[in-house]
Image: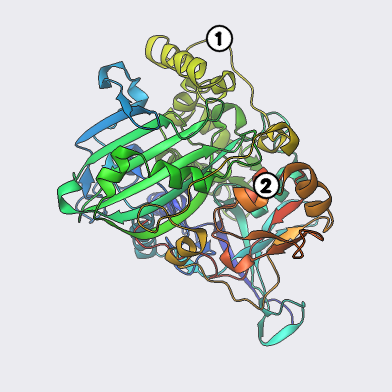
Amino acid sequence: MERESMEFDVVIVGGGPAGLSAAIKLRQLSAEAGIDISVCVLEKGSEIGAHILSGNVFETRALDELIPDWKEKGAPLNTPVKSEKFFFMTESSELRFPNFLLPKQLHNHGNYIISLGNFCRWLAEQAEAMEVEVYPGFAAAEVLYHEDGSVKGVATGDMGVGRDGEHKGSYEPGMELHAKYTLFAEGVRGSLTKTLFEKFNLRENCDPQTFGIGIKELWELDPEQHKEGQIFHSFGWPLDRNTYGGSFVYHLENNQAYVGYVVALDYENPYLSPYDEFQKFKTHPMMKEMLKGGKRISYGARAINEGGFQSVPELVFPGGALIGCTAGFLNVPKIKGSHTAMKSGMMAAEAIVAEMKLNAEAPAKVLDTYPALYKKSWVYDELYRVRNSRPAFKWGLLAGTLYTGLDLKILGGRTPWTFKHHDDHSALKKAKDCKKIDYPKYDGVYTFDKPSSVFLSNTNHEEDQPIHLTLKDDSVPVSINYVEYAGPEQRFCPAGVYEFLTDDDGSNPRLQINAQNCVHCKTCDIKDPTQNINWVVPEGGGGPNYPNM
């Protein structure tokens, strides 16, 4: 069956903050310019917001620019930050840092505790009211090209294909969406963006991107333990002094709190499990006191960009551009990327409208105006000033903390040098050179196993479909990962997707991939020491369905 096609001026891949902001800005500017620019947003989740996971303490700077009357329009920003604390944790106690000692990037006065998923649902409503066509449940699975090599658009994945590759009775071919410009807003480690990096050599002049994994739970607290508007962050225990990461706890409305943990994916010990580090964190006396009498009601995980300024790739190529976290605009010490992602989408929209005003029928193939706008923007300045904060922790927790404090608090990020990043997967040491980590058993009160967590993420995939966690070489997981690294994929995955099975006597190890558990965090694609795992999109509509996350 041949694929049908649809034509738009702009196709946007991804219904997150960047993609939706770009769509809204395009329609705003096109109305001002008196030209009609047709815009389509594709979202692989079952609905807008289904795959959106973030802390999230939200800075409104980009939103104020995009929709100044957002309060009147009912944006779901309901809980302003009222108080904040920052702790260094030990196993049995905590040391609070006075707020006046913290760099301004760590202060959150004027920010809001939000569900980023609900915020994106609201953004989608604003976009649709401006006649943007929003298509949830359709996963962009292929980049399409013109004969001259420029991007023509994307194709959605076929539906109704069995695990054996045969067409089922429900088979429907994917749809082609052609556009003058295609904006890729896939989020962290976008599966199509990876192919664009290679085809157009977009990472030639930047550092490798580096990542963390964020793991998050939504809790309903005992009202006596709930303090609406309070946030705190911590670092230290339970991570060792050479592993970057820390916690976030945000008290939103309705006696609910976000409890989460971020672990940098350049950790060295293959026995480390980010999921279990988070579960262990909740056994701290301060956390047990807060969670006592509460109930865990949702769970999720997602990789985040940590490379910042020096890891931003070339943003444009013939026929399209990268926006949002697929390019990597997160401000690491601020622990915020939504406002910068939104602004990147808005700048790309400005560049498109500028070109369309010059020649609506055949605008310039390459959006050179977009990277020029970025370099003049507050996003560029913000990322430049904090560029050395994350890589400084290569020297360990104490040295990294001291350097970051000096750089941000005293020098304002104006140092003449820029530290380098390295690929996360290259940091993993061989199992023989590391100690095993004994994690406490789950108690079902504060700590929980992976199956019960995945259940709370509402994750679902049609089981009879091709496995979307593909291996370049089927022999590598056992011959290298299991033998040399003790099978780290069974620990770095926060959803129990990867499982090594053996015979009763421990012989004949083999990897089982439980793809239906995948929460689309992308950690496996990043941390696999042999880079043998390639994450590709499953059928549209699959994956987690996060409520209020």
Q: Is residue 71 left or right of residue 359?
A: left
Which residue lies under the disc numbered 2?
488
Q: Quadrant of the N terminus?
A: bottom right
Query: Is residue 170 placed above or below 395 in the rendered structure?
Result: below
Amino acid type, callout 1: Pro
Query: Is residue 145 placed above or below 435 in the rendered structure?
Result: below
Which residue lies under the disc numbered 1?
416
- Measured as percent of width and height from the top left, residue 295 is found at 29, 59
Amino acid type, callout 2: Pro
- Measured as percent of width and height from the top left, residue 390 is found at 53, 26
Of all residues shown, which one is farthest toward the front?
505
Residue at image location 77% in from the left, 57% down from the top: 471
Q: Nearer the viewer, residue 548 or 257?
A: 257
Of all residues shown, which one is farthest toward the left?
224
Q: CA distance from mark 1 to mark 2?
A: 38 Å
Q: Nearer the viewer, residue 403 or 140?
A: 403
Q: Secondary structure at mark 2?
A: loop
Q: Is residue 193 visible?
A: no
Query: Is residue 498 placed above or below 171 in the rendered structure?
Result: above
- Measured as percent of width and height from the top left, residue 333 is found at 43, 28
